[in-house]
Structures are given as C-alpha cells and as structure tokens.
Image (cartoon, rainbow, N blue to C red):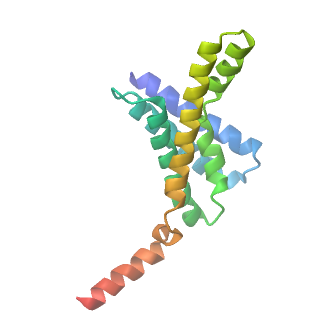
C-alpha cells in the first residue's frame, strides 16, 4: 500500500466518521475525537487485513476493539457517554457492501453467491460485536487516571 493510499484511507475514514457524527447530532466539540476514533479503527482494520492469512472478520474484530478502547478512554477524558464516540466510530467497519451484495444476489437469483456474502457479513458483524463486548466488559475504573494514581500511591506507601 502506497503512502497516498494510506493518506486517502485516513482522510476518508476521518471525514466519514465525522459525517456520521453530524447525522447523529453529536455536539460539535466532539467531532475531532469521533473522527480520530473512526480513523484509528479503520487503519487497524487495514493493517490487520493486509497480513497474510487474516480474514475480514478478524480484522473487523481488531478494528472494533481499537474503536471501543479509544471510545472508553475518551469517555473518561471528555466526560460524556461512550455512545458519542462508539456509534460514529464503528460505522466504517460495518459490512454494508456485503449486506448490499447479499440482497443483490438474492434478487438476481444467485443464491450461492448470496449465501457466501451473507455468511461473510454475519461473521464480520459478529466479530464487531465481540470486540465491543470484550472492551465494554473491562471495569470502568481501569480507564480512570485517579484509579491508577491511587494504586500507585498505595503501592508506594507499602514499600
């Protein structure tokens, strides 16, 4: 992948994520953070999917993992709900084209292709859900700086 392709992927994923943030009425002060979240998830997806023997579903899992991790960190840092960053940030990873082609192949009576695209889209969707579930199951305190400072002070007091 060339530098120009990487930059175009960065810009498109950033602008697309910000566009979805506008559609979902995210406050303007969070647009940049939403764009960074979606861009990081998409770049992770591209990096993982470019590796040999990595499927789109595995790449989607890691992309979703990164999006939710960044969303959790930004939630604590910017003091707002996680959905502000999660919903726009996850949208670049959603297998919209796969669902479209599944419907297209069904309408054109190409049922073998429809089943292949449909199963691939379901695997990607399931991988995204698993990435979200794993990061959301981490306790909230892990993302708070105060938690880490208290832990450090407690350990310093014992030594």
Quarter-of-image position of residue 148: bottom left
Q: Residue furthest left?
A: 159
- On screen, residue 18 above or below 72: above
Quarter that holds the N terminus: top left
Q: Give whichever of 60, 155 is nearer the camera.
A: 60
Residue at x 60%, y 14% (from the top left corner)? 112
Residue 18 % position (x, y): 65, 41
- On screen, residue 5 above or below 128: above
Residue 30 % position (x, y): 65, 53
Taking 116 as reference, is 101 left or right? right
Taking 60 as reference, is 121 left or right? right
Residue 67 seen in this snapshot: no
Residue at x 66%, y 54% (from the top left corner)? 84
Q: Give whichever of 87, 107 is nearer the camera.
A: 107
Residue 58 seen in this snapshot: yes
Q: Give whichever of 68, 28 is nearer the camera.
A: 68
Residue at x 34%, y 80% (from the top left corner)? 152
Residue 99 % position (x, y): 66, 26
């Amino acid at each position: 992948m060339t530098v120009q392709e990487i930059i175009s992927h960065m810009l498109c994923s950033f602008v697309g994520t910000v566009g979805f943030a506008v559609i979902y009425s995210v406050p303007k002060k969070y647009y940049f953070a939403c764009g960074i979240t979606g861009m990081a998830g998409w770049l992770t997806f591209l990096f993982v999917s470019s590796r040999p023997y990595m499927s789109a579903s595995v790449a989607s899992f890691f992309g979703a993992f990164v999006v939710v991790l960044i969303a959790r960190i930004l939630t604590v840092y910017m003091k707002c709900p996680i959905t502000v960053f999660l919903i726009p940030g996850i949208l670049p990873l959603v297998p919209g084209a796969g669902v479209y082609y599944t419907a297209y192949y069904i309408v054109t009576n190409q049922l073998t292709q429809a089943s292949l695209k449909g199963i691939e889209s379901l695997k990607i969707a399931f991988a995204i859900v698993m990435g979200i579930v794993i990061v959301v199951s981490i306790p909230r305190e892990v993302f708070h700086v105060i938690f880490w400072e208290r832990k450090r002070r407690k350990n310093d007091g014992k030594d």
